[in-house]
């Protein structure tokens, strides 16, 4: 037998198998043939794998949107990835904003209040941009890549073996149908032999598929570790951004008062939202900010003397004109003509300075 004859016979056998499966599948759909059902455990494993695949794809795609909101940039990165080439580095939005601020501040003049503030804000924005870049790189490596490897690797293998199991099941049921229709003893013997073979192949494929599907639990455990890495990366990023903005706020608050225009007023800082201590004279607005009771303020302004006040939160003075505070200490406060309504003059022994009213509970 030459190679051509062998290939022709193989093609004919494959065509016959395909036709047999198609007939069996059609008859099952029409309710004209019986169907071998998979055991409940295997069905549950298949359902779990499909559920894992669907949600992994959704989480992966939305994480990509979170890390890179620009759809054009995502498409470009996808193309470079498929070409196995590194995408060119691009300036991100915080870095671009920071550069604009620095350029504007330089043109306005670093010696001016506005120019100096713009430069400081621009430098902070560029640091946030660097942190943003680090978040994207860390998340892509420790979170997105493992999810993508599951979709493009493990699940493709599962889908391939699942399809093969479906084909073996169709072969088995087709053999059962032929055995039922067999009349002659010789034909029946041949059909019984075919049934034994197809049953064996089906059982073997079901076991292979089951072993692969049981690995989904390990996949979940691995993805949990990756999720923890992603949360840690986000926590680091937001902590960095918070610290950058806190430092920037202190720098902006340290500008001399004569930098401000006559029509501008200073704004009292807002206590940390994480504080759990709320005084009896403090009110919580719908936006979550803590404000001092207006009644106590009116009483203080109408009083020509001083009042005692309990400090609700720690406060670090931004400059020499302010007084640092410690939570729960009691200080003396009084109003000064011409001072912004959000501030009072505080006194502790020989120390004196402006204090934000949002940090105080006035005592009777």
Image (tube, rainbow, N blue to C red):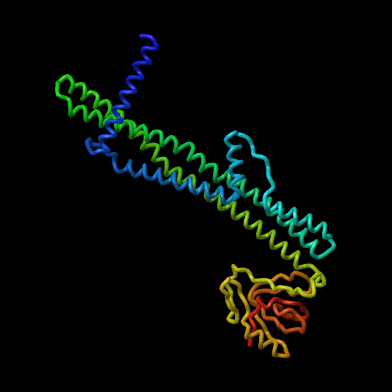
* Total labels drawn: 0
Residue 324 drawn at (x, y percent): 72, 73
Instruction: State which quadrant residue 26 falls in.
Output: top left
Where residue 331 sits in the image (x, y, percent)?
Answer: 70, 81
Nearer-the-camera pick, 253 or 99: 99
Residue 71, above or below 253: above
Position of 222 with respect to 111 (left or right) is: left
Residue 360's place in the image compared with 236, above or below, is below
Q: Is residue 145 above or below residue 240?
A: above
In percent of width and height, residue 229 lies at 56, 49
Q: Quadrant of the C terminus?
A: bottom right
Q: Residue at x 39, y 39 (%)?
A: 213
Would residue 291 be found to the left or right of residue 103 on screen?
A: left
| In front of the other: 41 or 93 | 93
Q: Camera-side residue: 217 or 11? A: 11
**Which image quadrant for residue 217?**
top left
Work out which quarter of the rendered image holds the N terminus and state it.
top left
Residue drawn 61% across the image and 41% down it: 76
Q: Viewed as shown, does residue 319 lie left or right of 71?
A: right
Is 8 located above or below residue 99 in the figure? above
Residue depicted at 63% across the width and 58% down the height: 239
Residue 126 place in picture, x, y as percent: 72, 53
Most distant residue in the left direction: 184
């Amino acid at each position: 037998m030459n190679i051509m004859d062998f290939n022709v016979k193989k093609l004919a056998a494959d065509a016959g198998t395909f036709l047999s499966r198609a007939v069996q599948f059609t008859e099952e759909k029409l309710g004209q043939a019986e169907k071998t059902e998979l055991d409940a455990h295997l069905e549950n494993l298949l359902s779990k794998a499909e559920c894992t695949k669907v949600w992994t794809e959704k989480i992966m795609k939305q994480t990509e949107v979170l890390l890179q909101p620009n759809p054009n940039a995502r498409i470009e990165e996808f193309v470079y990835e498929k070409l196995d080439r590194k995408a060119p580095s691009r300036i991100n939005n915080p870095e671009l904003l920071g550069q604009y601020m620095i350029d504007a501040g330089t043109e306005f003049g670093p010696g001016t209040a506005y120019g100096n503030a713009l430069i400081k804000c621009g430098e902070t924005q560029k640091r946030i941009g660097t942190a943003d870049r680090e978040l994207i790189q860390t998340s892509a490596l420790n979170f997105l890549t493992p999810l993508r490897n599951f979709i493009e690797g493990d699940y493709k293998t599962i889908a391939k073996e699942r399809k093969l199991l479906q084909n073996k099941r169709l072969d088995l049921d087709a053999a059962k149908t032929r055995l039922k229709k067999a009349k002659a003893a010789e034909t029946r013997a041949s059909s019984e032999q075919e049934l034994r073979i197809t049953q064996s192949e089906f059982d073997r494929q079901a076991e292979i598929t089951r072993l692969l599907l049981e690995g989904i639990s390990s996949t979940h455990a691995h993805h949990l570790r990756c999720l923890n890495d992603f949360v840690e990366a986000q926590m680091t990023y937001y902590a960095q951004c918070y610290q950058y903005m806190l430092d920037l706020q202190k720098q902006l608050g340290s500008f001399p008062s004569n930098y401000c225009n006559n029509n501008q007023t200073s704004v009292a800082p807002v206590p940390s939202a994480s504080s759990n201590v709320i005084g009896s004279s403090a009110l919580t607005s719908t936006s979550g900010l803590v404000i001092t009771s207006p009644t106590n303020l009116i009483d203080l302004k109408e009083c020509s003397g001083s009042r005692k006040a309990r400090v609700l939160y720690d406060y670090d003075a931004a400059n020499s004109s302010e007084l640092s505070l410690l939570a729960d200490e009691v200080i003396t406060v009084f109003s000064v003509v011409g001072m912004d309504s959000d501030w009072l003059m505080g006194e502790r022994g020989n120390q004196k300075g402006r204090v934000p009213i949002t940090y105080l509970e006035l005592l009777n």
